[in-house]
Amino acid sequence: MRKTEDLFDEAISLPVEKRTLLVDKLFLSLNPTQIEIDKLWAEEAEKRVKEIANSTAKTIPGEKVFTKIRKRIF
């Protein structure tokens, strides 16, 4: 088995595009995606954006939300 330092050196010597792919693959190996869940969240986000754009969603000003949170915490 190769030494870790040799592996790092080889990875660093790769072209930027290859290093980017390597970083993506390593990150995904630590945090596997849940494709169906990600898809559902994306659909929900799009739905909410449309509701806000069409003024069919009830929005709450951020300061009001944070005031309510502060009251619950403190």
Image (spheres, grey):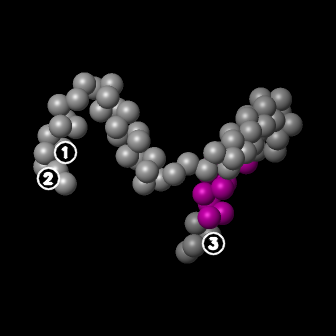
Where's the C terminus, which quadrant?
A: bottom right
Q: What amino acid does circle 1 point to?
A: Leu
Which residue range is magenta in the image? Answer: 60-69
Is 68 part of what is drawn in magenta?
yes
Write the residue at 56% across / 48% down: 33
Q: What amino acid does circle 3 point to?
A: Arg
Residue at far front of view: 1
Q: Say above or below: 64 vs 68.
A: above
Marks 2 and 1: CB-CB under 8 Å? yes
Write the residue at 32% across / 28% down: 18
Judge left or right: residue 36 versus residue 2. Answer: right
Closer-to-camera residue (72/13): 13
Residues at marks 2 and 3, CA–CA distance in whole angstroms: 52 Å
Write the residue at 34% across / 32% down: 20
The image quadrant of residue 8 is top left
Residue tagged 1: 7
Q: Say above or below: 39 vs 70.
A: above
Q: Which mark is residue 3?
A: 2
Residue tagged 3: 72
Q: What amino acid does circle 2 point to?
A: Lys
